[in-house]
Image (tube, rainbow, N blue to C red):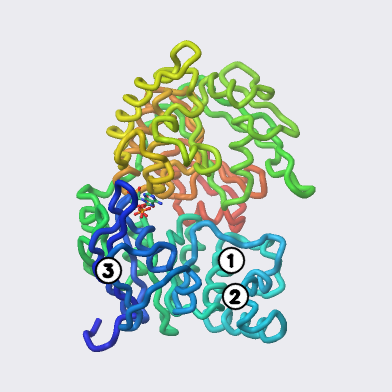
């Protein structure tokens, strides 16, 4: 980075306050044109807030934003887009029933209309950045990696020269991560600037040209990915060592906690979403379920929790056939649930943390007091969870909406583990949490397993799946297509099974 060339993006002294929280304080960020710049920091450090400020979703209370050396003031994302700043959100915002072309053009018809010129521009974008997009493909027929490329194309179509990506690899399998990094290299080669948020420090080191570390709302420094180890980065972020999920001593007992027999769940079309799944989880066993998003894992979890009807098959908890039980009866029967979509299933965003603490657990300690909720005990226990799980928030009365994503997740994990279920359904338990909190959650899952809890772990983090599971199954198009020994399989092999590239079960499979 030379002093003479103006920086693509420079943030000077950015401060952003929310009621009771200073989310960003005096942030300094310097991003050179044509570089890939990573932003790392623990949960609640202020990364999303900073990116939302740069994208015009928040107005900073103090500080300046400079693009190419000139100060800008954004009143809305439209202003940011007009100035060449685009954002690819972690949750895609595409319409499934429309084509790639329609999705890209939607809302930007002014640029090149909706006809031949628009098509030509999309083809040109796809070719020059090697995105491999077909304008007429329906988005519903695309995999996760391609959908992400459509989102990137959307932003480029709107003229972005600086792209912000929010945890872009969280939903990708290793092969797709490599493809995305290839795309980023193309963007860079063409002189575009990429800023991305990530919790995966190995990836950050692999793909970033420079790194800014944020801690508790402020910049603590920049790091050179070529000379900084993942461990040093983690220490800059949280002052802790990088954890590993490795667990090998088996604690699996003979008693089954959960048995699925031929579980089938209807899908949207003719093909079932879950297709005759038969599985057993024993006490002290972690059963890992791998799969590319959208291959029936979510529906299988819903079926176990009674959130979706069975088209065929049975669900047995211990020795009870619970196929017809309500979700509440299943929870009271000893199933803990860490849902994938915490905003839809696990949390009331407009309620205080202590109410979220007792959500779904109203009939047990510490909440239950006759017919009423014991508010005092609930608040005290919320404080305990906040301490033990390092939930960073002003207090138990804080509304859940004011917490960063990772801190919301820690509260849910704390709540579910506190009920000591005999079976835990954990869907992406560490998604969005930083390395420090991740190691805490891994340790807690391992302890619970050692004490005999059966755990169904659905995760897109292959290291987590391989490291924590006693048995690994792969789901593809609703069916279990492979059963693997986590001690033998590499993330690459697992990724191959997940995409259907590998169909034979390798030697050493369970
Ligand atoms: N709309 C809001 N209202 C109140 N507080 C907020 C709001 N948005 C964020 N915060 C607070 O600002 C701080 C920074 O949150 P932010 O989401 O930027 O963190 P983050 O680094 O992106 O975290 P994560 O890795 O968990 O996503 C947190 O303390 C959070 O609770």
Q: Is residue 85 left or right of residue 297?
A: left
The structure residue drawn at horizontal position 71% and vertical position 32%, both measured from the top left corner, is 310
Residue 460: x and y in percent read 49, 50
Asked whether the residues under the numbered discs 1 and 2 touch, taking CB atoms below 8 Å apart as contact, a structural biologist would say: yes
Residue 480: x and y in percent read 63, 42
Q: Which mark is residue 132?
A: 2
Asked whether the residues under the numbered discs 1 and 3 touch, taking CB atoms below 8 Å apart as contact, a structural biologist would say: no
Asked whether the residues under the numbered discs 3 and 2 touch, taking CB atoms below 8 Å apart as contact, a structural biologist would say: no
Residue 59: x and y in percent read 38, 64
Furthest residue in direction bottom, as rendered: 4
The quarter holding residue 190 reads: bottom left
- The residue labelled by disc 3 is 63
Question: Is residue 487 among the parts visible in the rendering?
Answer: no
Nearer to us in this view, 157 or 296: 157
Does the beta carbon of the residue at mark 1 sit less than 8 Å from ligand 1? no
- Disc 2 crowd rating (10 Å Cα; few below 14, some 14-19, many 20+) is some
The structure residue drawn at horizontal position 49% and vertical position 18%, both measured from the top left corner, is 363
Q: How many marks?
A: 3
- 488 lies above or below 260: below
């Amino acid at each position: 980075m030379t002093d003479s060339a103006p920086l693509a993006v420079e943030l000077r002294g950015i401060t952003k306050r929310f009621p009771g929280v200073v989310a960003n304080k005096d942030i300094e960020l310097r991003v050179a044109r044509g570089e890939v710049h990573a932003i790392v920091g623990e949960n609640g450090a202020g990364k999303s807030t900073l990116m939302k400020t740069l994208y015009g979703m928040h107005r900073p209370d103090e500080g300046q934003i400079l693009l190419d050396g000139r100060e800008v003031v954004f009143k809305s994302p439209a202003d940011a887009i007009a100035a060449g700043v685009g954002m690819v959100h972690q949750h895609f915002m595409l319409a499934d029933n429309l084509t790639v072309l329609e999705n890209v053009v939607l809302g930007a018809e002014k640029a090149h209309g909706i006809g031949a010129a628009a098509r030509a521009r999309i083809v040109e974008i796809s070719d020059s950045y090697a995105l491999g997009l077909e304008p007429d493909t329906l988005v519903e027929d695309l995999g996760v990696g391609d959908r992400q490329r459509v989102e990137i194309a959307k932003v480029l179509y709107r003229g972005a020269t600086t792209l912000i990506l929010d945890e872009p690899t969280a939903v990708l399998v290793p092969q797709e991560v490599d493809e995305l990094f290839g795309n980023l290299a193309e963007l860079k080669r063409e002189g575009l600037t990429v800023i991305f948020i990530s919790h995966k420090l190995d990836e950050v080191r692999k793909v970033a040209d420079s790194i800014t570390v944020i801690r508790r709302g402020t910049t603590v420094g920049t790091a050179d990915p070529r000379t900084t180890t993942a461990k040093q980065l983690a220490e800059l972020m949280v002052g802790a060592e990088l954890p590993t999920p490795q667990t090998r001593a088996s604690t699996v007992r003979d008693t089954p906690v959960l048995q699925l027999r031929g579980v089938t769940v209807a899908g949207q079309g003719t093909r079932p979403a879950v297709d005759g799944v038969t599985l057993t989880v024993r006490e002290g066993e972690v059963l890992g379920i791998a799969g590319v998003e959208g291959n029936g894992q979510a529906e299988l979890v819903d079926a176990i929790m009674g959130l979706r009807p069975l088209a065929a098959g049975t669900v047995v908890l211990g020795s009870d056939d619970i196929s017809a039980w309500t979700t509440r009866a299943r929870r009271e029967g000893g199933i803990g649930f860490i849902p994938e979509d915490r905003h839809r299933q696990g949390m009331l965003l407009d309620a205080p943390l202590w109410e979220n603490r007792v959500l779904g657990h109203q009939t047990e300690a510490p909440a239950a007091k006759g017919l009423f909720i014991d508010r005092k005990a609930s608040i005290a226990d919320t404080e305990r969870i906040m301490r033990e799980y390092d939930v960073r928030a002003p207090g138990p009365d804080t509304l859940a909406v004011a917490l960063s994503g990772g801190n919301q997740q820690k509260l849910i994990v704390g709540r579910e583990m506190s009920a000591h279920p005999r079976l835990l359904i954990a869907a992406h338990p560490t998604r969005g949490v930083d390395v420090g909190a991740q190691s805490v959650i891994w340790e807690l899952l391992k302890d619970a397993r050692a004490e005999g809890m059966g755990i169904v772990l659905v995760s897109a983090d292959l290291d987590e799946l391989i490291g924590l599971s006693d048995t690994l199954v792969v789901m593809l198009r609703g069916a279990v297509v492979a059963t693997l020994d986590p001690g033998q399989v590499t993330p690459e092999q697992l990724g191959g099974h997940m995409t259907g590239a590998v169909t034979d079960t390798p030697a050493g499979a369970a």
